[in-house]
Image (cartoon, grey):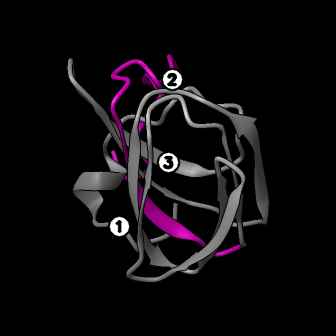
Amino acid sequence: MSQYFPPFIRALPAPASMFEIDAHIVPSDRVVTMFYEAHDDIEVAQHAHGAQWGVVLVGEMEMVISGESRIYRAGDTYYVPPQAEHLARLRAGYKGIDVFADADRYVPREDSESSDG
């Protein structure tokens, strides 16, 4: 992970994820919050889950939510309603924060160690 996020965030556990992103999560019994960045372009295929809210910190992302496409840039927030079909295309350099209503959406990777100890 770059130095964009401060050390205490980079010290959080990495999520078990199939995507090639640098990410750290704050798991809880109610939601999971994820701080992340994409070094390369990434496409997250169409899927659905509980509600999701996010904010773009740096870069650009296209989201298609329930068939409606929109580009989100730094400072924009987005909301995905529960069970809404959606996909995302993150551009290289993207940095953001997402909060998922499904507390088990991402769990710490078993071998998760922080980048900064």
Residue at x 38%, y 24% (from the top left corner)? 102
Q: Find disc 1 in the rendering and name its residue.
A: 5
Marks 1 and 2, the one that precedes in the sequence:
1
Query: Judging from the image, what secondary structure is the residue with disc 2 in?
Result: loop
In this picture, which residue range is highlighted in magenta? 92-117
Tell me residue 30's x, y (percent): 21, 23
Give the Cα separation between the discs numbered 1 and 2.
19 Å
Q: Is 117 left or right of 43, judged from the image as shown? A: left
Answer whether labels 2 and 3 touch (C-beta < 8 Å).
Answer: no
Give the x, y percent position of residue 91: 72, 72
For disc 2, the marked residue is 109
| Residue 12 lies in quadrant | top left
Q: Earlier in the sequence, mark 2 or mark 3?
A: 3
Query: In this figure, which residue is indicated by the disc labeled 3?
Result: 23
Q: Which residue shows up at 57% across the image and 80% down it?
A: 59
Q: Splitting the image into 4 quarters, where does residue 78 fall?
A: bottom left
Disc 1 marks a residue whose amino acid type is: Phe
Vertically, is 93 above or below 6? below
